[in-house]
Structures are given as structure tokens and as C-alpha cells.
Amino acid sequence: MLNPAVSPDEEPLDSRRLQQFLCVAEHSSFSRAADQLHLSQQALSSSVAKLEAQLGVPLFDRTGRQVRLTAAGQALFDGASVLLAAGQVLARQVRDAAATERRPFVVAHTPAVTAEEVHGLLGPVRSQMPEVSVTAVQMFPGDLESGVLDGTVDLALRRGTTAPATLAAAVIAYHPLRIAVARGHHLAAHHTIAIRDLRDERIVVWAPPGASFYTDFILSNCRRAGFEPSLVVPRIQGTTPTSAVLDHPDAVAFVTAPSGAALGGAVHVIDITDPPLAPVQAIWLPHTRSAVRDLLITGDSHARSHRRVPE
């Protein structure tokens, strides 16, 4: 029996129908989706038709050989995976609430955000929620969003400012950039350096321009200093950023590591005059709640005092 306080167009969307809709959209075919779901094509078509009737709009254009999403179908496709993921997270939180041993809160970070920086950002949780277990894992940027969507990651940290289309995001910290050089590099004796002094240097980046916010951020700062940089992408990925110059001892790398000797003296990190501030962006699944995540995003007064905001 329908709730009389809820009109038909406000009825909750059925999660199973949404999953079936997503499968059809991903395969661009009712027959292939039916095989994948182990349903008859008639049953799957009926399920999607009921979803279309509930929403009052067609979700697929069925005029060609392949079914294609309509504008309304695309809107549902963009939001359905997030909605279903939020439901799975809620179910897990309910089970966790009854469990004697709580699941760790998982924070993923890209190699551009070092493990030491993650530890610093966890300061509010360490001090205000000492009973919470947190696991930090390093992931490549392309894997962060899928990790958040499938629930294996509770909060992801990366260098960036543009929010993903289907996820929530906020910049929670800024770290000053410095320059890393190999011990034998001609700049290694410097204590400070200006970005404009790097015009004749090769600069290590971890992805080509256009493929990484961090690369584009470095590129824009070089251009602001009046030169077009010569870029090199290292063969070894995923290690600490300061290690990049070990395989390219004639090059320099922008890092956020503390100034001074690094990696046992093999690398020297140099302060930049008026350094650019590299953002740390947190991304998470919308439509979900988490006290740990809220504390990590907002921090406390001490944590915020160390998060410089550019003027």
C-alpha cells in the first residue's frame, strides 16, 4: 500500500531496478545486459519500463541497433552509481555499529601527497578520536574515484581543485612547494631559489600536461615566472616525489618535502622564494555521513592554523 503522504513521483527509486538500468546503459544493449544479470530480456525490459513509468520520462532511445541514453537517462546514469554506493556504505555502517571490532577508516592518497603529510592531516583524528583506527593507502590518481565509489576508500586525498562530477570534494590544506635536486646537481648548494632561476633546467613531472592537475599546476607557475619548462616524466612511478631526481640527476622536481637533506643525503630540498602553495583536495561519497570524515575535513583550530590559504 502506498504511503498517502508521498505522491507517486516522489516514491523512492528501487535499487534493483537502478542496478539493472545501469547494466543496460553500460552494455548499450538489453540482450547483453540480460545475459550479464541472468534475466530474461523480457523481464529486464519490463523492469526498465517500470522505472521509466515511475519517473515519467524515457531513459533510452531504442530506435537504432544499440540502445542509447536519452538526456534524462544520462542524468540518472550520472547519479545512480553514487546513490547505490551510498546505500552500500549505509548498510556497512549499520553492520559496523553492531560489530565488536570496527572496520578501519581508510584514507587513500596519491604519491603527490606524502605519507608524512597524510599523518599530519590526521592530527585532529589522532587527538580527538584516539579510539578510531585509520589505514592510509597510496593509490594512483586514476584509481581514487573508483575506490571511493566501491566503498573500499572512505576519504581520498589528492592534489587538485576541480571537483569530480559525481563526488563531493573540498580543499582542506595547502603545502608550500620546494625544489628537490640530486646531491651532485649544480643547484644543490643553494638554500633558496626563485622559480625563474629554473628556466634552463629540466623539470620532473609525474604525468604529461593535461593528464594531471599537479603537472598543470607546476606548468602554470613556470609560465607565470616567464618561461616554458622542459618536462620529463620518470620511468618509475609511485615512489616518494623526492626520489624522482635520483633517476634524473640533471633535472629538478617540485616537492612538498621539508627543506634540507633527504633520502640519506642523496637529495637536497631547497626552499623557493615566495613559494606556490599546492592544494590538498579531499574527495568522498556524497549522501553519506561520517564523524571521522567531518573531523578530517574541518579539523580543529590548531590544525587550521597550519593550513595556509593563498591570498
Image (spheres, rainbow, N blue to C red):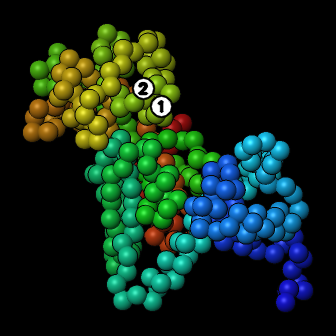
Task: Return the residue nearer the eye: 103 or 161.
Answer: 103
Q: Secondary structure at mark 2?
A: loop
Task: Return the residue nearer the eye: 126 or 158.
Answer: 158
The quadrant in which the N terminus is found is bottom right
The reply to whether residue 125 is in sight is no
Is residue 182 placed above or below 154 in the rendered structure?
A: above
Residues at circles 1 and 2 in contact by the CB criterion of under 8 Å: yes
In percent of width and height, residue 225 lies at: 45, 16
Is residue 28 placed above or below 83 in the rendered structure?
A: above
Q: Which mark is drawn over residue 208? A: 2
The quadrant in which the C terminus is found is top right
Q: Secondary structure at mark 1?
A: loop
Q: Residues within 10 Å of mark 1 (few under 14, many from 20)?
A: few
Question: At label 1, which amino acid type do we have?
Answer: Ala
Q: Which residue is mark 1?
A: 211
Residue at 80% across / 48% down in the picture? Answer: 62
The reply to whether residue 17 is in sight is yes
Whether residue 210 sits left or right of residue 185 in the image: it is right
* Cα–Cα span, label 1 and label 2: 6 Å
Question: At label 2, which amino acid type do we have?
Answer: Pro
Whether residue 20 sits left or right of residue 51 in the image: it is left
Residue at 38% across / 76% down in the picture? Answer: 103
